[in-house]
Amino acid sequence: MASFQVARTTVLVLVVVSLGQVCMGSRRLATLVQPAPLEYHNGAVLQGDVPITILWYGKFTPSQKSIISDFLLSLTPQPHQKLSGPSVSQWWNTIDEVYLSKAGTKSPKKTQILLAGQVSDEMCSLSKSLTRDQISELAAKAGPKKSGIVLVLTAEDVTVEGFCMSRCGLHGSDRKAGSTYIWVGNPTTQCPGQCAWPFHQPVSGPQTPPLVAPNGDVGIDGMVLNLASMMAGTVTNPFGDGFYQGPKEAPLEAATACPGVYAKGAYPGYPGDLLVDPATGASYNANGARGRKYLVPALFEPSTSSCSTLV
């Protein structure tokens, strides 16, 4: 993976707020700071087999579900699935090598993402306006597995406390049960400028033209960006005492320490020199399962204090 020194580059970092065991991350760029070294705080990480359960809250089309499911399958593809580089699996392997392999309790096998099940709540049983507590309630109802992750994905007409105002997604945990959860919302109608950039014109800052979304759905491709960021934070800092920098109440994690960076040459308002599909004009930096293309965030490398990208 390509990298560049954070110490030499001013980067945009969002200062986020956390409550209890909830760690909140967002791609809404807000505050210019220089990140401190990211440290390991001797806590647990998620290693080995990590079962994923998806809760689709609200209405998602089969095409939208397929884009997200294929992304998850791209993280640790089956041996017969050969992904051409740069790939989503290469990005995920970096998390394993840079973070998980250096944790106190080392797993004999690489971290494998397993799609364990999917649940739909199209009728929005807790209404279309959710609080943070209701996100954790939904995750618990989805049947979380030990050492697993429940993904609570909300449709474009579902509002969530703090969505668009301070975050595009969050991750949290139930330490007693040994399980974790992630919430990400579809920003299509509520805040594409904050939570689907660079596939939509930003709300503020440099007004660069939006890029073409690799899967033809600005909201869902934006969800993949935020989901990738939250997946990186969840496996490396699942219970708030793993890898992070800054105060525990407002941590910056593996991906959120490099916001807005997707390729070499990135600067505020410009995601970097991305690959472009000649057939569609779409921008991407990672190949995925079933011939899909995705955009994944840069990862912070603690040993060099740099943001590492695939291209």
Image: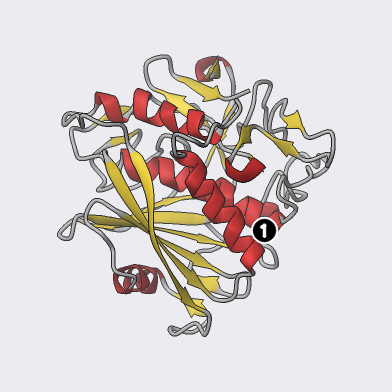
Q: Residue drawn at (44%, 34%), measured in percent from left and top?
A: 79
In the depicted structure, whether residue 26 falls above or below residue 274: below
Q: Which residue position holds label 1?
A: 219
Q: Quadrant of the C terminus?
A: top right
In the rendered image, the residue lying farthest to the front is 80
Q: Say whether residue 264 is left or right of residue 105.
A: right
Where is residue 103 shown, x and y percent of the image?
Answer: 23, 29
In the depicted structure, whether residue 52 falls above or below residue 211: below
Q: Residue drawn at (51%, 17%), measured in percent from left and top?
A: 7
Where is residue 145 shown, x and y percent of the image?
Answer: 25, 59
Q: Say whether residue 136 is left or right of residue 159.
A: left
Task: Specify the amino acid type for callout 1.
Answer: Gly
Q: Quadrant of residue 62?
A: bottom right
Q: Quadrant of residue 252?
A: top left
In the depicted structure, whether residue 112 falls above or below residue 175: above
- Secondary structure, mark 1, is helix
Asked if one can make out residue 22 in the rendered structure from this viewpoint, the answer is: no
For label 1, the crowd category at 10 Å Cα-Cα, with few meaning under 14, some 14 to 19 and many 20 or more, is: many
Where is residue 17 shown, x and y percent of the image?
Answer: 40, 52
Quick one: 182 or 4, which is closer to the camera?
Answer: 182
Asked if one can make out residue 185 in the rendered structure from this viewpoint, the answer is: yes
Quick one: 44 or 164, which is closer to the camera?
Answer: 44
Q: Residue drawn at (47%, 36%), measured in percent from left and top?
A: 255
Quick one: 59 or 236, which is closer to the camera?
Answer: 59
Q: Quadrant of residue 20?
A: bottom left
Q: Say whether residue 225 is left or right of residue 46.
A: right
Q: Identify the image's colour scheme: rainbow, by chain, secondary structure or one colour.
A: secondary structure
Where is residue 209 shown, x and y percent of the image?
Answer: 83, 42
